[in-house]
Image (tube, rainbow, N blue to C red):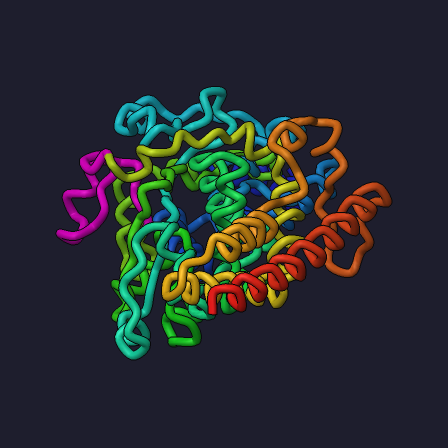
Amino acid sequence: MSRLTGIIAGLLVAALAAPAGAGEVVVVTSFPKELFETYKRAFEAKHPDTKVVIKQQQTNAGVTYLQETKARPDADLFWVSAPDAFATLKAAGLLDPYTLPKEIAARIPAKIGAFPIHDPEGYRKGFAASGYGIMWNTRYLKAKNLPEPREWDDLKKPIYHGHVGISAPSRSGTTHLTVETLLQGEGWTKGWASLLEMGGNFATVTERSFGVPDGVNNGQFGVGIVIDFFGLSSQASGFPVGFAYPRVTTLVPANVGIIKNAPHPKAAAAFIEFLLSPEGQEILLDKKIRRLPVLPAVYAKAPQDYPNPFKDKSIGAAVKFDADVSTARYQLVNSLFDHMITFRLKELRAAWRAIHEAEAALKAKPSAQASGLLARARKLAGTVPVAEKEAADPKFTGIFKRVKKGQAPPKRQAEVEKQWDSFAKKNYAEAQELAAKAGAAAK
C-alpha cells in the first residue's frame, strides 16, 4: 500500500469512527443572544466534536430564508417560538419528522395548557412554553402615579395614554402570537376593537420585539406588551419591573424542528435531545432566559415564585390557541395591524385622546346628544375594514404575502392595503371630529 493510499484509508476509518454529529450543526433562530449563546456553549461542552453555527433571523425572515434555500439547504434546525411558523414550513414540505428516543419522550407531557407540546407527526418539538402579557416599570408607574396594569382592558384606560409600547407583529413572531391570542380569545371583531383602543395609548410600535422590554427597563415608556420571558428575565436581572398574565392569554410551546434535507441530521437530532434533557431544560431557568420548561420535574429547581403551568392551570386556560387559524391569516393580520395601527399611530392616538377627553366632560355634564356622538366615534375608531368571514376566506387571505423591506407588495395586495389606509385615515379623522363635537356639547 502506498503512503498516499494509507493516508486516505486512515482518514476514511477516522471518519467512519467519528461520533454521530461530528462537525457542525447550523441553526436558524429568532431567539436573543442571551439564550442561543448559553445553549451553544453548553452543547459544545457536552459535544466537543460539534460546533454550533447560529444564523439569527426574525421569524418571518427565517421562514422566507428556508423557502428560498430549499433546493440546497445549508441549515439543519429551525428554532423559534411561533408554532404557526412551523405549520407553514410543514405544509410546504420544508421540515423532516423526527422521533425522540423513548426515555426522553416519556418524561414530557402531551400538552401544556391546551396546546400539544410536540407536533403529533413529529415535525416540531416543543422545548419551552411561553405565555403573553404585560410588563411594567415600577419606578415609572410610581413617578407618573399610575396603577399596575394586569388585564388587557386596563391598557384601554385614558391614564395610560402615551405610556404603552408594543412591537409590530409583522416584525416580531412573538408579538404576532400575542395579537392572534387576543383575536382568538375575544373574537375577531371585539379583539380588533380592543387592539385599536389600546393602540390609542401606544407611545411607540417598535421594529423588533427586544425594543419593548428595553424601553420598559430603561423607563422610555412605562408599560410593554410582551412575551412572558422578557418580563421574567428583566425581573431576575434586577430591573425594577413587574409582569402579569392577563386572563385572556394562552400558553404555546417554543419549538425546534429539523429542516428538510438538513446537511447534518445526526447533529441536529443531538441538539434537540440536549434541549429536552434535564440539563438542557434547567438552562431555561437562567435569570437571563427565564422560559417555562416542558419537563415538569425541572420546576423543583426553579425559584419559589417561578410560574409553573403544570401546577397553576389558570395560566393560558382561557384561550385554546388554534395554530391553523393563525397560520391561515398570518400575513393578513400582520398587514392589517400595520395599516390600522403602526402606520397610522399618530391619527389613532389623536382620535382616542379626543374620545377620552369627551368622555371625561360627559361625566361632569351628561348629554344624550353627546353620548350618541361618542358612540359613533368609538365605533369608527374601533373597527377594521375586514370581517371575520373574509379573514377566514383562503381566496382573500392568499392575497397577502410577506414583503421584504424595500420591496413592493404584489399588485392586488397593494390595492387592498391602499384601501385600508384610506379607511383608517377617514375613520380616525371622523372619530376625532365627532368626539370634539361631543365634548363641546357636554360643556
Q: Nearer the viewer, residue 405 or 378?
A: 378
Q: Nearer the viewer, residue 414 or 306?
A: 414
Left or right: 2 with respect to 76? right
Q: Is residue 136 visible?
A: yes
| 106 w.r.t. 139: above or below | above
Q: Which residues are magenta?
A: 291-313
Is 1 part of what is drawn in magenta?
no
Q: How many marks?
A: 0
| 394 w.r.t. 25: above or below | above
Asked which quadrant contains residue 250, the reply is top left
Query: What residue do we see at 23% from left, 46% from top?
Result: 307
In the image, residue 318 lies at what x, y percent? 34, 34
Query: What residue do we see at 51% from left, 66% from top?
Result: 439
Residue sitting at the far right: 411
Q: Is residue 2 visible?
A: no
In the image, residue 345 lies at what x, y percent? 60, 63
In the image, residue 7 lies at what x, y percent? 61, 45
Q: Nearer the viewer, residue 68 or 17?
A: 68
Q: Quadrant of the N terminus?
A: top right
Is 297 part of what is drawn in magenta?
yes
Q: Nearer the viewer, residue 392 or 443?
A: 443
| 391 w.r.t. 182: above or below | above
Residue sitting at the far bottom: 143
In the image, residue 424 lies at what x, y percent? 68, 54
Left or right: 145 with respect to 415? left
Query: What residue do we see at 18% from left, 35% from top?
Result: 311
Query: What residue do we see at 40% from left, 51% from top?
Result: 227
Q: Main secondary structure of the magenta part?
A: loop
